[in-house]
Amino acid sequence: MAPVPNNTQLAIIASAFFVPVLIYLYFTRAQTKKGNAGPLPESTEITALYVYPIKSCHGISVQSTKHEFLTIRNFAKMTLVRPTYDALTDTLTITAPAPDSIDEKLEFTIPAHPSKQWLDSNTSTHDAKIWSTWTPARVYSPSLTAPFNAFFDKQVRLVYKASLPDPPRPLVSNGAPNILWRSATTHFPDLMPLLVGNESSLTELNTRMHGAGDKARHGRAALPAEHARQRKRGCAL
């Protein structure tokens, strides 16, 4: 058998080395192009922020933020329950229209960020049901919310979900770990602790509400949707 020329040997060795490298680079580049989602869209401007200290009740507009139940689905007038935050005293004052009265209001005040010591002295611990899930919660005294029984036409209690040391609720559905790819928790919101909406969608929804003749009390226009949906961790009625 005739010997293989040295040049041919070098060519075979070079091919055996470079061909796999070239194939690898080709497929890597192809996958990169395939996974490229294109340029990012223009920045979205946040036009309004609301915090909702009590689930389903009226929210508080702010410029920035660091931070078995009753639901508006069954009690639409919960939108008339209005929390007001006092930064000087770090308290929440909750008001609602008094039944059978035009001028009187129901009212009570609680700490906005109660300490564990305050909660231990002023609340009791019971399980609260959020849809089909039970979670530990702090229950305020029945005397605190007694005036609101007439407003709801049933006995109600205010409950609070503290950040610590109470155990949080794991997210489920499209917030479950197999969908979100991480474990996350919330407090009293139905699902997500943060909801984002755009003004055009809210404007369209409110237009439909007005068109359907959905009017609030005293002949005023229907309550804008931004006051009825978003929720923040904390209290629930």
Image: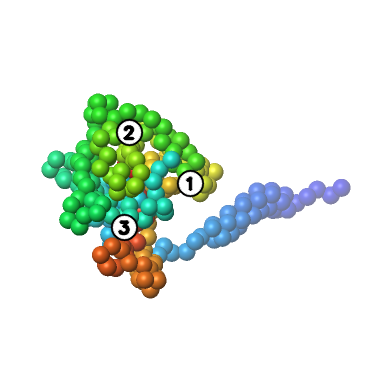
Between residues 102 and 38, which one lies in front from this camera angle? 102
Secondary element type, mark 3: helix
Residue 66, above or below 30: above
Secondary element type, mark 1: helix
Q: Disc number at residue 225? A: none
- Dot 3 alpha-carbon crowd within 10 angstroms: few under 14, some 14 to 19, many 20 or more: some
| Residue lying farthest to the right in this orientation | 1
| Discs 1/2, front | 2
Q: Residue at x 29, y 34 (%)?
A: 142
Residue 219, can we see it? yes
Q: Residue at x 14, y 40 (%)?
A: 89
C-alpha span from label 1 to label 2 = 27 Å
Q: Residue at x 50, y 41 (%)?
A: 132
- Dot 2 alpha-carbon crowd within 10 angstroms: few under 14, some 14 to 19, many 20 or more: many
C-alpha span from label 1 to label 3 = 24 Å
Q: Is residue 85 left or right of residue 58?
A: left
| Discs 1/3, front | 3
Task: Determine which residue is flagged by label 2.
Answer: 139
Mark positioned earlier in the residue sequence (3 or 2): 2
Residue type at mark 1: give it: Gly
Task: Determine which residue is flagged by label 3.
Answer: 227
Residue 13, above or below 47: above
Q: Is residue 6 left or right of residue 117?
A: right
Q: Disc number at residue 175? A: 1
The quarter of the rendered structure image containing the C terminus is top left
- Dot 1 alpha-carbon crowd within 10 angstroms: few under 14, some 14 to 19, many 20 or more: some
| Residue lying farthest to the left in this orientation | 88
Q: Is residue 15 left or right of residue 197?
A: right
Q: Position of residue 82 (x, y in %)?
A: 25, 51
Residue type at mark 3: give it: His
